[in-house]
Amino acid sequence: MNEINASRRLKEAASHKAEADKVRQVKNAEAEAEARYLSGVGVARQRKAIIQGLQSSVAEFSEDVEGATPKDVMDILLLSQYFDTLSAVGANSLILEHDPSTVANLQAQVGRGFLKQK
């Protein structure tokens, strides 16, 4: 009789352990999903802040420099980002094509990409 009761308790214990493992896995998956969601929210906020900063920079530069258009400012920003990319890539010993037409082609591609998304 003791063996029957012991066997039943072991069976119940195994069932409870399996249920606890299931709950643990579900909670881990929920936590990971929440972390990814919050990471996405953070990236979205970061991008929004960058865009707001660019907008204010373009507006201020256009006001401060007579004759400068927002397009001129965006061209300057694109060129400076291109040079930043060159220096970052150059630190890794990679070779990029570099001539003035490359920047113009890059600008045209980015512009077409934005127009297609609208």
Image (tube, rainbow, N blue to C red):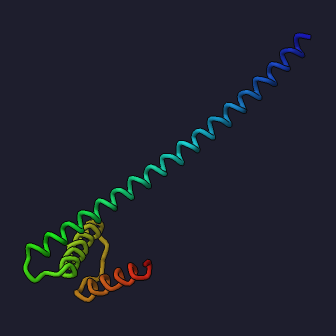
Q: Residue at x 31, y 87 (%)?
A: 105
Q: Is residue 44 above or below residue 114?
A: above
Task: Please identify the residue farthest to the top as the structure is shown.
Answer: 2
Which residue is more in the foreground, 96 or 108?
108
Residue 69: percent from left, percent from top:
17, 81
Residue 92: percent from left, percent from top:
30, 66
Q: Residue at x 38, y 53 (%)?
A: 42
Query: Is 91 placed left or right of 115 in the picture?
Result: left
Q: Residue at x 44, y 49 (%)?
A: 38
Query: Is 82 placed left or right of 4 in the picture?
Result: left
Q: Residue at x 18, y 68 (%)?
A: 57
Q: Is residue 33 above or below residue 108?
A: above
| Quarter of the picture holding the N terminus | top right
Q: Is residue 10 above or below residue 113?
A: above
Task: Please identify the residue farthest to the right as the structure is shown.
Answer: 1
Q: Where on the picture, by quarter, is residue 114?
A: bottom left
Residue 62: percent from left, percent from top:
14, 75
Total tally of numbered discs in the picture: 0
Residue 76: percent from left, percent from top:
18, 77
Query: Is 3 placed left or right of 15 in the picture?
Result: right
| Quarter of the picture holding the C terminus | bottom left
Q: Where on the picture, by quarter, is residue 67?
A: bottom left
Which residue is more in the foreground, 57 or 94?
57
